[in-house]
Image (tube, grey):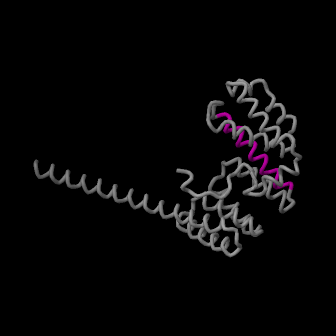
């Protein structure tokens, strides 16, 4: 009986040791991936064309190491866009959409890039409609008290503008219920002022141009270091 207990304890210890080693290896691997991403961002941010090309190559290595690392694709896209490598940028966008197919902000940006750079308004509208459905689904699952509610609402209104649904966008912004969502009137007024200045007062063409530039203030974020997410 004692022998069986000793064997059981030994096996359990081995399994725990293997589990700890596996986690440590995974953590170390992820750290290496983040560091390589951060190095690429630092080099590419110098602005020199040659440096940006080096950054793109480093990001390719990151992606080869971790094919589902969305942030690396986003940084790569921004650098490709900066150099005017639009065909490469579209290939990167396709990969990003495969990794994150239910991201409405990405759908909106893809639509704007299609419209701005390929003059493909039909495919652009398809992406805006896909984004609209995803936004509606999100609002079915989050409450107004959620931290992401305000930014999601801003991006939803923006997408409505691109769809040509100006009346709906304006109605949502000035809906009496929006005031209730933000609890305090001054918070709602700040939200409304931001939306009016950055969305409602801009023409549709200005919005498309703004969103179609990955670092130009669209719904997605500019190239960032992974350490900033920690």
Report the side of 34 relative to 6 (left or right).
Answer: right
View extreme (left): residue: 2
Q: Nearer the viewer, residue 94 or 222?
A: 222
Q: Nearer the viewer, residue 6 or 200?
A: 200
Report the side of 226 relative to 25 (left or right).
Answer: right
Residue 144, how many percent across, how many down? 66, 30
View extreme (bottom): residue: 50
Q: Quadrant of residue 197?
A: top right
Magenta segment: does it hold 194?
A: no
> Residue at 67% of width from left, 24% of height from top?
183
Magenta segment: does it hold 138?
A: yes
Residue 23, how many percent across, how many down? 39, 56
Look at the magenta stretch and give its main secondary structure: helix
Residue 59, how many percent across, how many down? 60, 67
Report the side of 181 relative to 19 (left or right).
Answer: right
Segment colored magenta: 121-140
Q: Nearer the viewer, residue 194 or 131?
A: 194
> Residue at 77% of width from left, 38% of height from top?
194
> Residue at 58% of width from left, 66% of height from top?
63
Residue 115, how many percent across, how many down? 84, 57
């Amino acid at each position: 009986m004692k022998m069986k207990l000793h064997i059981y304890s030994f096996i359990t210890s081995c399994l725990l040791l293997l589990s700890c080693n596996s986690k440590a290896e995974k953590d170390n691997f992820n750290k290496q991936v983040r560091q390589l991403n951060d190095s690429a961002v630092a080099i590419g941010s110098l602005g020199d064309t040659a440096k940006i090309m080096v950054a793109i190559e480093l990001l390719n290595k990151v992606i080869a190491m971790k094919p589902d690392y969305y942030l690396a694709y986003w940084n790569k896209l921004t650098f490709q866009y900066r150099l005017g490598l639009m065909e490469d940028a579209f290939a990167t966008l396709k990969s990003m959409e495969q990794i994150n197919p239910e991201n409405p902000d990405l759908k909106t940006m893809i639509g704007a890039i299609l419209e701005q750079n390929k003059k493909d308004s039909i495919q652009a509208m398809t992406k805006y409609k896909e984004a609209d459905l995803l936004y509606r689904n999100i609002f079915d699952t989050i409450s107004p008290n959620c931290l992401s509610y305000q930014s999601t609402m801003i991006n939803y209104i923006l997408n409505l503008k691109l769809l040509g649904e100006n009346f709906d966008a304006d109605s949502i912004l000035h809906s009496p219920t929006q005031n209730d969502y933000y609890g305090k009137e001054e918070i709602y007024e700040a939200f409304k002022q931001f939306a009016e200045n950055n969305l409602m007062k801009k023409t549709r063409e200005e919005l498309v141009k703004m969103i179609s530039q990955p670092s130009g203030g669209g719904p997605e974020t500019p190239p960032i270091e992974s350490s900033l997410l920690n």
